[in-house]
Image: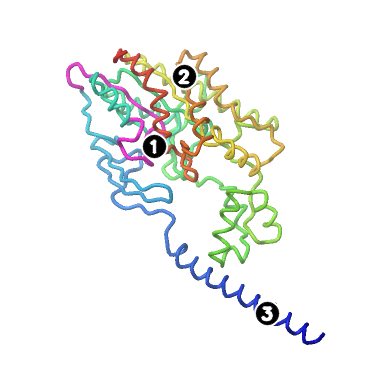
């Protein structure tokens, strides 16, 4: 009997030592492969600079090589601060202009120039002598885009302006601090009109609830590269499990409260509903003034709705609901549906392709980068397929 117990103890000890050796080897490998490799590499000259009127803007003649987990790209900005070929303010006789405006989806920093929405439209509309401008700027909200049109884009005398609208525009149209905690201008309502507040010279960093909630890190997460790698992927796939582990000090805490950008998809009380109503009121006012500025120059103005990945991908939407408060009155279609009503009242055409994006996300050939959340090559193609017929009609370009 004692011999058998001793044999089992030896086997258990051997198994434990083997497991520890495997974990130790995996930890060493994780430290070498993960912690020595930066999450993203940026090389070259800056492609963004501070602007006293816009907060920031794309930097003329900036060239940057960006390498991230899902893409590797070189971005070149021309001498007038636009991505793409050099295009003078004054067009050649007979040539017309289309300006694509918006945030990073319009700018396309995650795609090669020929694969961007601008690149595809330029190739398709080229035979009709139509210059296509990439007037997108990463991180811009609708207010900055309107100001950028007045400050720069109108100098090109576009015949059509297409504004790409993304759900977080609603939130940032009220804020004085934009993405990456950068100071930005904002508009305040005063006596029925909009009053411009320029960007602050030094922005007060926005309170990052996520960082604050995760400030108390578990020792295992903080000191083990292997566990940090596994825990971070658990946060992205099963935030509910990750939150349960955080109760035992094994993973960083996860806030249950969604960021302000998500409120239009599910305000839960009077305070949040009031905030969402303010977002829509301010955005509607800005869109109306933007429309007027464009049409006063003789150009057409339309809005292209950019669905977020979680609006198009069922798994991503399920993640949002698991990640934050599951009992919220979430409505995935709320922003797109209400935007349609706002634009109808403003007499601004809306171009939608959400069904095409959802269909793509149900296949293996997805339209979005899974981690980054922007369009991949197929996503840009779907956007082009939805926008090109409207622009061909607007410019009477072909049948």
Query: Which mark identifies residue 350?
Result: 2
Residue pointed to by mark 1: 377
Work out whether 361 lies above or below 29.
Answer: above
**Front disc: 1 or 3:** 3
Task: Assess whether residue 96 is covered by the magenta stretch.
Answer: yes
Q: Check if mark 1's residue and mark 3's residue have beta carbons within 8 Å.
A: no
**Front disc: 1 or 2:** 1
The region drawn magenta spans 91-118
Asked if residue 84 lies left or right of residue 143, the reply is left
Viewer can see residue 173:
no
Q: Earlier in the sequence, mark 2 or mark 3?
A: 3
- Whole-angstrom CA distance, mark 1 to mark 3, is 53 Å
**Front disc: 2 or 3:** 3
Residue pointed to by mark 3: 13
Question: Which quadrant holds residue 59?
Answer: top left
Which type of secondary structure does the marked residue at label 3 adopt?
Answer: helix
Q: Check if mark 1's residue and mark 2's residue have beta carbons within 8 Å.
A: no
Work out whether 195 lies above or below 318.
Answer: above
């Amino acid at each position: 009997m004692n011999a058998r117990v001793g044999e089992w103890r030896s086997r258990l000890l051997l198994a434990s030592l083997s497991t520890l050796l495997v974990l130790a080897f995996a930890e060493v490998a994780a430290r070498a492969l993960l912690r020595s490799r930066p999450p993203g590499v940026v090389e070259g000259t800056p492609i963004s600079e501070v602007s006293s009127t816009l907060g920031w803007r794309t930097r003329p003649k900036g060239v940057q090589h960006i390498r991230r987990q899902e893409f590797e790209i070189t971005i070149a900005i021309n001498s007038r601060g636009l991505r793409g070929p050099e295009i003078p303010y004054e067009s050649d006789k007979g040539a017309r202009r289309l300006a694509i405006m918006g945030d990073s989806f319009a700018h396309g920093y995650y795609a090669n120039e020929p694969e961007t929405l601008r690149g595809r439209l330029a190739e398709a509309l080229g035979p009709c002598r139509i210059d296509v401008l990439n007037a997108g700027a990463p991180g811009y909200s609708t207010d900055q885009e309107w100001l950028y049109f007045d400050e720069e884009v109108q100098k090109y005398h576009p015949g059509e302006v297409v504004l790409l609208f993304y759900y977080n525009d609603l939130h940032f149209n009220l804020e004085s601090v934009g993405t990456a905690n950068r100071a930005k201008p904002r508009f305040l309502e005063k006596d029925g009109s909009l009053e411009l507040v320029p960007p602050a010279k030094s922005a007060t960093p926005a309170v990052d609830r996520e960082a604050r909630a995760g400030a108390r890190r578990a020792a295992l997460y903080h000191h083990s590269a292997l566990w940090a790698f596994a825990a971070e992927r658990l946060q992205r796939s099963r935030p509910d499990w990750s939150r349960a582990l955080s109760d035992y000090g094994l993973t960083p805490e996860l806030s249950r409260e969604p960021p302000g950008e998500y409120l239009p998809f599910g305000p839960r009380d009077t305070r949040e509903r009031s905030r969402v109503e303010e977002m829509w009121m301010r955005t509607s006012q800005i869109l109306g003034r933007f429309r007027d500025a464009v049409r006063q120059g003789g150009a057409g103005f339309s809005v292209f709705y950019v669905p977020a990945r979680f609006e198009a991908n069922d798994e991503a939407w399920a993640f949002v609901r698991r990640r934050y408060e599951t009992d919220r009155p979430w409505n995935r279609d709320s922003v797109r549906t209400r935007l349609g009503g706002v634009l109808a009242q403003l007499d601004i055409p809306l171009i939608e392709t959400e069904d095409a994006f959802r269909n793509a996300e149900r296949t293996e050939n997805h339209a979005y980068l899974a981690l980054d959340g922007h369009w991949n090559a197929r996503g840009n193609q779907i956007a082009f397929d939805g926008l090109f017929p409207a622009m061909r009609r607007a410019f009477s370009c072909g049948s």
